Image (cartoon, helix red, strand yellow):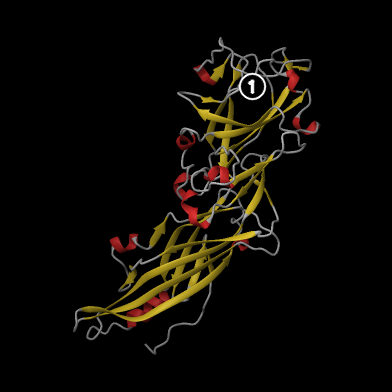
């Protein structure tokens, strides 16, 4: 089938791509890219893919697979990525570029009613960031470590890639995998427009925002302790938060999502260790989350801790649920005017385990789940849903 394309896959010396209108007239296949409407980098943990501009940085770009199906459409025949295979597309001075350049195939086929030209079909798939698939250097080459393999060039069926989570010691190198909406059954036109890939998140993210609140019953109990003589104020101070995640370690992503805005098509891959643990700790916080029934504006800002979230594959094995165990340590302090000091009356530890699959949005690609911890019942709120851990109330023994 490759014989149907141009005899020279290199860019000819006379080739000139027109920049006007995103078109070119050379017969070469050219690409453009943008983020989908659901792409929200401002709500996700920092990563190499915060913006489209980050994809344009030197050496990043995206990978492209293409299946040539001749006069048949994609679903009419057995397909394989024989036309383009993980071609690395990077941003040059003004356009997305790759080498060697591919040209629209010519030959006998269906005649287009609009142009009168012979139509041969090519279907395109893309992901980002591009991976060289070396699989060994998570610190210096996180994309190559996370995106570990692809379907073989001659394999028939939908093109896929495998993705694994970054190691604990390199959590700051997390790779926010993107998957483009497929461009099926494309063919050469009279004037070749650029093929526009629209990228969406393929992973989900949890815990990028961790917020603390105090239960109304707890506030009432603490307020009742203020007698304006021995104690004139009360406050709750958080000292430590630890989130211990158990997550699916590896998954296979089909580079075909179906309809626009559909969820990424994940398949879990069983291995000797189907799940892995990732732990995030906020240490030595010592931040007031409640004082005398309210906090000052400055203290209110301190009730959220941002940008330590974890990317995870939105799929799991039966019997290997993905969970987040949240542990918190806080202290209850009273202000005693006689000594003019805040005195710690009690140090409290609370723990809750959340199973992600109990929440309707947890396994939708591109979703971001916030964690909220509510003190008193030591209950945890995930994406607006509360999980009660310990219903034992504080008593008048204080």
Q: Residue visible at 36% across and 76% down?
A: 331
Q: Residue visible at 46% across and 82% down?
A: 393
Residue 147 visible in the shown view: yes
Q: Is residue 184 left or right of residue 203?
A: right
Viewport quadrant of the C terminus: bottom left
Q: Position of residue 169 (x, y in %)?
A: 49, 56
Disc 1 is placed on an element classified as loop
Q: Is residue 159 above or below residue 366?
A: above
The residue singled out by tag 1 in the image is 102
Q: Residue furthest bottom?
A: 397
Viewport quadrant of the N terminus: top right
Q: Residue furthest top?
A: 14
Q: Nearer the viewer, residue 38 or 2?
A: 2
How many badges with numbers are in the image? 1
Q: Position of residue 380 (x, y in %)?
A: 50, 68
Residue 184 visible in the shown view: no
Q: Residue furthest front?
A: 136
Q: Is residue 212 above or below residue 114?
A: below
Q: Position of residue 234 (x, y in %)?
A: 30, 77
Q: Nearer the viewer, residue 222 or 73?
A: 73
Q: Is residue 113 above or below residue 322?
A: above
Q: Is residue 374 above or below residue 255?
A: below
**Picture quadrant of residue 281:** bottom left
Q: Position of residue 125 (x, y in %)?
A: 65, 34
| Crowd class of label 1 (few under 14; some 14 to 19; many from 20; radius 10 Å) | some
Q: Is residue 130 left or right of residue 238?
A: right
């Amino acid at each position: 089938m490759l014989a149907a394309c141009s005899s020279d896959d290199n860019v000819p010396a006379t080739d000139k791509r027109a920049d006007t209108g995103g078109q070119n007239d050379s017969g070469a296949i050219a690409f453009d890219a943008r983020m989908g409407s659901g792409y929200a980098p401002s709500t996700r943990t920092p990563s190499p893919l915060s913006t489209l501009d980050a994809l344009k940085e030197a050496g990043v770009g995206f990978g492209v697979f293409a299946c040539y199906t001749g006069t048949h459409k994609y679903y009419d025949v057995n397909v394989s990525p024989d036309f383009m295979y993980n071609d690395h597309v990077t941003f040059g001075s003004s356009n997305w570029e790759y080498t060697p350049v591919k040209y629209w195939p010519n030959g006998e086929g269906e005649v287009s009613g609009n142009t009168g030209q012979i139509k041969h079909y090519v279907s395109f798939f893309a992901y980002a960031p591009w991976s060289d698939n070396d699989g060994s250097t998570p610190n210096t080459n996180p994309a190559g470590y996370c995106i570990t393999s692809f379907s073989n060039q001659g394999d028939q069926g939908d093109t896929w890639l495998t993705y694994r989570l970054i190691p604990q010691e390199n959590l700051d190198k997390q790779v926010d995998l993107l998957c483009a909406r497929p461009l099926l059954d494309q063919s050469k036109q009279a004037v070749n427009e650029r093929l526009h890939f629209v990228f969406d998140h393929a992973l989900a993210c949890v815990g990028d925002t961790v917020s603390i609140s105090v239960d109304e019953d707890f506030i009432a109990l603490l307020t009742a302790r203020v007698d304006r003589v021995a104690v004139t104020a009360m406050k709750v101070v958080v000292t430590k938060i630890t989130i211990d995640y158990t997550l699916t370690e590896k998954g296979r992503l089909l580079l075909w999502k179906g309809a626009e805005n559909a969820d990424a098509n994940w398949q879990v891959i069983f291995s000797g260790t189907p799940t892995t643990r990732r732990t995030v700790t906020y240490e030595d916080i010592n931040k007031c989350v409640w004082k005398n029934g309210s906090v000052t504006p400055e203290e209110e800002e301190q009730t959220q801790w941002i940008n330590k979230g974890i990317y995870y594959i939105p799929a799991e094995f039966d019997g290997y649920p993905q969970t987040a165990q949240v542990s918190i340590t806080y202290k209850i302090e009273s202000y005693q005017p006689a000594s003019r000091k805040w005195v710690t009356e009690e140090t409290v530890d609370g723990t809750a385990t959340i199973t992600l699959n109990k929440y309707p949005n947890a396994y939708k690609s591109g979703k971001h789940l916030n964690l909220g911890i509510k003190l008193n019942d030591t209950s945890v709120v995930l994406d607006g849903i509360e999980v009660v851990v310990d219903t034992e109330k504080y008593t008048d023994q204080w």
